[in-house]
Image (tube, rainbow, N blue to C red):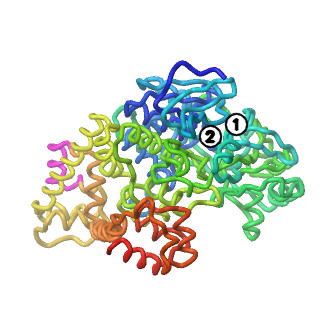
């Protein structure tokens, strides 16, 4: 083995969404960082759907951006369509989503990484850790290198002993056409880690020129598209590509069933658990046998390609079955498949083996992020990546860890769920997982997180200045609304237009604007408020915050109170060497789960499955409360 002449603070293994964010964060915090990946042309590759965001995932992308990450910026720079999902629901449910140019996304990510001082790239395959005197000291590679570092972040995605399935055909690989990573799992298991298997899948890609879009529903982007990043370095789209919607039918389902006897999903060839909320088409047919059709989204892969992604048709069935069943979908009668769908099975490590910083409990300065922890989705991976990068850097600097609470960010919910509850199937974020989702909206991610990130040195001066200016404008607008009164002749035309009762005498502006029928476009029809907004430069982003503040004040206040109550348990720390097995009053299951997971606070302990309320009461006594 050849010892590489450079020594690094942090080595990041794998340049997917987790690895890219991890490397960027560590380097931006002053760490000499090396990002090692097998193929430098596939940085942050969109292996599955060419899109970022969506329900709950869009909130995560905005949180990553607010912290000083790059996923939102790259998503904006490579977007071909923007939509704000769930507009018909309350603002806690609004979720931004971009359709992206797959190739451009990778190019833009590499451009961002290459601009960062102190970050280097290397093409090689890591096969194991390098230890000196039992302590982590770097990594070993396929090409015979020992590269030394003080910390290592593993973000191996689906590459650890990956196996690809298309019908009865099995191929070793981490992605279609790419080799798998071998050696890391085996080495980690030797060191005492527990490993498991999971699976995921991807749909076929098809030639748009072979489709009949007249038989499908067109799904356009928003008329006034937004964007992910809070920074002005990106701009909303001026032109957009459409997606299309079509449906399966009983004939499609019957054709698919012909291949079930050759499906690795049903033959027992695939042992790993698949994603519950993104099932394969064959899974859907079995689990929802009473449904006559399933929705398919036909999504463009970029500006200058005719390749389309068939979202909703994930499959590992034989290629003849894939072809024949797709040709029975309306609009797909003459379809030409560019790449067949496939399933992939890979190794993961149950995340209860991690601390909230994503550092492993077993080996100091070793961090796991992304699908290696049992998650699915680019956004979930990127969120773990930025947090692992931050915490690796802070630990090497001798500073306090950076941990987000469940009331502070979706990222906090994600990591707390993983390390506290673990997962035995690919974990996906939903708004329903966040008990404080009214506080954790996509529109206020910068207000919540940028000050925290700026304090540790990651978020830039520019980001902080923009947040402070936004806060200032929100406050002066709220002050104006609180003090100002309006006359009937000024507001009644607006109220009547919206079908809400007119007023007979002067009234406080706050009371008028709080009416649920009025939106920000109506606010600007009130002359005195419009004049104020133009004078003070109150833009749409600030107006949206004001609208939410006025209409949802009671709900927001209630959630804040609930968060404060929960924080009382979070503030009670459990000593790292606390021996749960010596407390006779704890239940046997409680002792077992607490000893395994080793929660750092009573709040975390209370969320562990199998730890009862009475166990928490016992711990309260032992903690001196």
Give the x, y percent position of residue 348. Answer: 65, 50
Q: Tell me the residue at 29%/54% (across/down).
A: 545
- Label 2, secondary structure: give it: loop
Secondary structure, mark 1, is: loop
Q: Nearer the viewer, residue 228 or 328?
A: 228
Q: Where residue 111 sits: x, y (%)?
A: 49, 25
Q: Residue at x 73, y 61 (%)?
A: 284
- Separation of residues labelled 2 and 1 (CA atoms): 8 Å
Quadrant of the image occupied by residue 64: top left
In the rendered image, which residue does mark 2 sit on? 156
**Is 1 situated left or right of 228 in this image?**
right
Above or below residue 423? Residue 32 is above
> Between 231 and 125, which is closer to the camera in this rendering?
125
The prevailing secondary structure element of the residues shown in magenta is: helix
- Say whether marks 2 and 1 touch (CB < 8 Å): yes
Please state the horizontal and vertical placement of residue 409, each as a whole percent of the image: 40, 55
* Front-most of residues 569 and 494: 569
Number of callouts = 2
Quarter of the figure with residue 127? top right
Q: Residues within 10 Å of mark 2 (few under 14, many from 20)?
A: many
Q: Residue 58, how many percent across, how many down?
A: 47, 50
Q: Residue at x 80, y 56 (%)?
A: 265
Where is the C terminus found, in terms of image quarters?
bottom left
Marks 2 and 1, the one that precedes in the sequence = 2
Which range is magenta?
Answer: 524-537
Query: Does residue 450 sit above or below 582 in this rendering?
Result: above
Is residue 347 within the magenta segment?
no
Left or right, residue 64 beside residue 562: right
Left or right of 395, for residue 536: left
Identify the residue position indicated by label 1 in the image. 181
Q: Is residue 529 magenta?
A: yes
Which label sits on residue 126? none
């Amino acid at each position: 083995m050849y010892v590489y002449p450079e020594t690094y603070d942090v080595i990041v293994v794998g340049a997917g969404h987790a690895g890219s964010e991890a490397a960027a964060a560590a380097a931006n915090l002053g760490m000499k960082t090396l990002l090692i990946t097998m193929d430098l042309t596939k940085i942050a590759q969109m292996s599955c759907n060419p899109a970022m965001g969506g329900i709950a995932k869009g909130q995560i992308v905005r949180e990553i951006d607010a912290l000083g990450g790059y996923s939102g910026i790259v998503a904006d720079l490579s977007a071909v369509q923007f939509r704000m999902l769930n507009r018909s629901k309350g603002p806690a449910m609004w979720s931004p989503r971009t359709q992206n140019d797959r190739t451009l996304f990778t190019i833009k990510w590499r451009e961002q990484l290459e601009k960062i001082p102190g970050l280097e790239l290397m093409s090689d395959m890591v096969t194991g850790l390098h230890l000196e005197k039992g302590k982590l000291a770097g990594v070993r590679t396929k090409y015979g290198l020992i590269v030394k570092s003080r910390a290592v972040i593993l973000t191996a995605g689906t590459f650890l002993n990956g196996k690809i399935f298309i019908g009865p055909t099995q191929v070793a690989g981490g992605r279609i056409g790419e080799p798998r990573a071998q050696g890391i799992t085996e080495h980690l298991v030797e060191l005492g880690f527990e490993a498991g298997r999971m699976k995921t899948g991807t749909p076929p890609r098809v030639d748009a020129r072979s489709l009949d879009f007249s038989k499908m529903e067109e799904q356009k982007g928003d008329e006034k598209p937004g964007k992910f990043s809070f920074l002005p370095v990106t701009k909303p789209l001026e032109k957009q590509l459409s997606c299309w919607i079509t449906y399966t039918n009983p004939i499609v389902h019957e054709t698919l069933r012909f291949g079930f006897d050759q499906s690795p999903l049903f033959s027992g060839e695939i042992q790993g658990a698949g994603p519950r909320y993104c099932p394969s088409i064959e899974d859907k047919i079995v689990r929802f046998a009473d449904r006559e059709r399933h929705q398919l989204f036909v999504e463009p892969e970029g500006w200058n390609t005719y390749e389309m992604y068939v979202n909703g048709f994930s499959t590992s069935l034989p290629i003849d079955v894939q072809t024949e069943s797709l040709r029975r979908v309306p609009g797909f009668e003459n379809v030409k498949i560019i790449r067949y769908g496939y399933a992939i099975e890979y190794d993961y490590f149950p995340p209860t083996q991690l601390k909230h910083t994503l550092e492993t409990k077993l080996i100091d300065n070793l961090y796991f992020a992304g699908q290696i922890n049992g998650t699915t989705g680019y956004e979930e991976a990127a969120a773990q990546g930025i947090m692992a990068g931050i915490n690796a850097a802070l630990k090497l600097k001798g500073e306090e860890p950076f941990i987000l609470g469940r009331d502070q960010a979706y990222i906090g919910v994600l990591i707390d769920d993983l390390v506290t509850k673990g997962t035995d199937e690919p974990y996906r974020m939903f708004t329903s997982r966040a008990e404080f989702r009214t506080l954790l909206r996509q529109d206020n991610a910068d207000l919540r997180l940028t000050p925290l990130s700026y304090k540790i040195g990651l978020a830039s001066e520019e980001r902080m200045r923009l947040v402070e200016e936004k806060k200032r404008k929100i406050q002066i607008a709220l002050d104006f609304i609180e003090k100002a009164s309006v006359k009937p002749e000024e507001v009644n035309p607006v109220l009547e237009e919206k079908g809400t009762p007119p007023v007979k005498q002067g009234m406080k502006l706050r009371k008028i604007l709080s009416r649920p029928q009025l939106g920000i476009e109506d606010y600007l029809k009130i002359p005195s408020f419009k004049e104020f907004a133009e004078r003070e430069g109150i833009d749409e982003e600030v107006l949206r915050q004001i609208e939410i503040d006025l209409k949802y004040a009671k709900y927001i206040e209630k959630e804040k109170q609930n968060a404060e109550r929960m924080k009382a348990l979070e503030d009670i720390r459990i000593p790292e060497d606390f021996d749960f097995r010596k407390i006779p009053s704890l239940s046997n299951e409680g002792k077992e789960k607490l000893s395994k997971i080793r929660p750092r606070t009573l709040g975390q302990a209370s969320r562990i499955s199998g730890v009862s309320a009475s166990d928490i009461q016992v711990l309260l006594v032992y903690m001196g409360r």
